Amino acid sequence: AGTLFTFLLNFYVSAFFSVVDKDGTVEPLTQTARMKMAAVMASTDTVAPMAFISAASFPQLYAVVFGEGVLNDVVSVLLSASVQDAAELPSTPALVGQICKFLFASTALGLVFGVGISLLFKYFTAMREDVIKSSILMLGLNYVCYVVTEMVEMSSIFALFVCALCCGHYARYSLSPQARHFVHELAEFLAYLAEAVVFGYFGLTAVRYLHDFCWKLIFSYLACIFLGRLLAVLFMVLLGNVLKRFKGLSLSWRELVVVWLSGCIRGTIAYALILKAVPMDEDQTPEDRVMVTTVLGIVLLNCLLVGGLFPLMMRLLGLQARALDLGASHAELATSTLHGDANGSETGTNPDTFGQFEGEHVPHVLRARRAAHRGWHHLDNTYFKDWLRPADWALSEQSPGSILRGV
């Protein structure tokens, strides 16, 4: 809902926005530019708020912010790919059809590569012996998925996400504990390195584009983002109160404020999407350049202001992390991960446990969720794990420490 509200609000309100050409002529944004900007501005930056929200102290808030952030990014990537070449806003059926096309095609490509990598590491046992080569091969094959999807003009980001998800759930069990730990540390190092490069690039390009920033356009889009996010949160709260009377996953008004603000942050995904949506620098029109500088300005303001004020707001709202016995919680997590529960879940959570209800009434939405959860665990435990993981995958988790490093 947040992505939809933000996309529609940015698209229709941006009809009143204008850009100044090189010769001083004031022209309104074209529909193509408005659609590209609306799709790009629908993405969120999940990393910044997750750094300040404790999963142990606020598990429901953490799950909502993380899950919604991932979903918003996925939808915005698909939206951006769907409207990239459109001259005007497609009809609702056409837009949904385009999104479904990119969704299913990119998912299929990600699954093909993810399953292929899992089978490759399962049956070619020689790859498990060398720690460095197997780790580099794992990351390299995931990058091949990205390149191939890009070549067929589907959503390469989403395909890579699906492929990495499969590898993390299946293929990593074919690695030795040492290789598993190494690839985890290597991926984390590359993530920190990429983040450092991106923000360093922000700083370098900000100086270059400083005189090209259209501050009126930047603050107009920021206002649309905050307003659209607020409307989305209010709509979902009202919808939740109407459809179900459910206490177990309810959020307080303080936590709803955090959900609202965390969905307003824009980061590297937005900047990557706008660079992908416009031509190279030498072929950019003045409108393309304004689009790039506007997104860059919004990302910089979010990093400097919203990201900096987020921990202060958490403290003012009284949402500080509680002091917990992390050693005990880690041991419990390791034990539940190693042995699983009665339903075969690796995380130790029961698929039937979704909170407390008033009386005996269970909403139909939650019943369907329970059924889907049980069905997935049944398929995964009965077929997929035996097919895609080595026979001794449970024994490869030798200690709680190795489990925590692999998660």
Image (cartoon, helix red, strand yellow):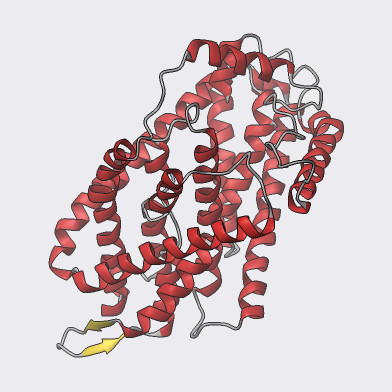
The one nearer the camera, 193 or 49, is: 49
Q: Quadrant of residue 309?
A: top left
The one nearer the camera, 250 or 216, is: 250
The one nearer the camera, 67 or 317, is: 317
The one nearer the camera, 32 or 309, is: 309
Q: In this view, does 169 lie above or below 258?
A: above
Q: Position of residue 352 (x, y in %)?
A: 77, 35
- Residue pictured at 50% horizontal, 77% vertical: 85
Say left or right for 324 vs 206. Answer: right
Say left or right for 308 vs 115. Answer: left
Q: Where is residue 73 in the image (x, y as percent from the top left)?
A: 50, 55
- Residue pictured at 50% horizontal, 26% vertical: 56
Q: In this view of the protein, can residue 22 be seen by the observer?
A: yes
Q: Position of residue 379 (x, y in %)?
A: 84, 38
Residue at far front of view: 359
The quadrant of the picture occupied by the C terminus is top right
Residue at far right of view: 382
The quadrant of the picture occupied by the N terminus is bottom right
Say left or right for 363 vs 85. Answer: right
Q: Is residue 224 above or below residue 246?
A: below
Q: Is residue 345 above or below residue 194?
A: above
Q: Position of residue 175 (x, y in %)?
A: 64, 22
- Residue pictured at 53% horizontal, 30% vertical: 136
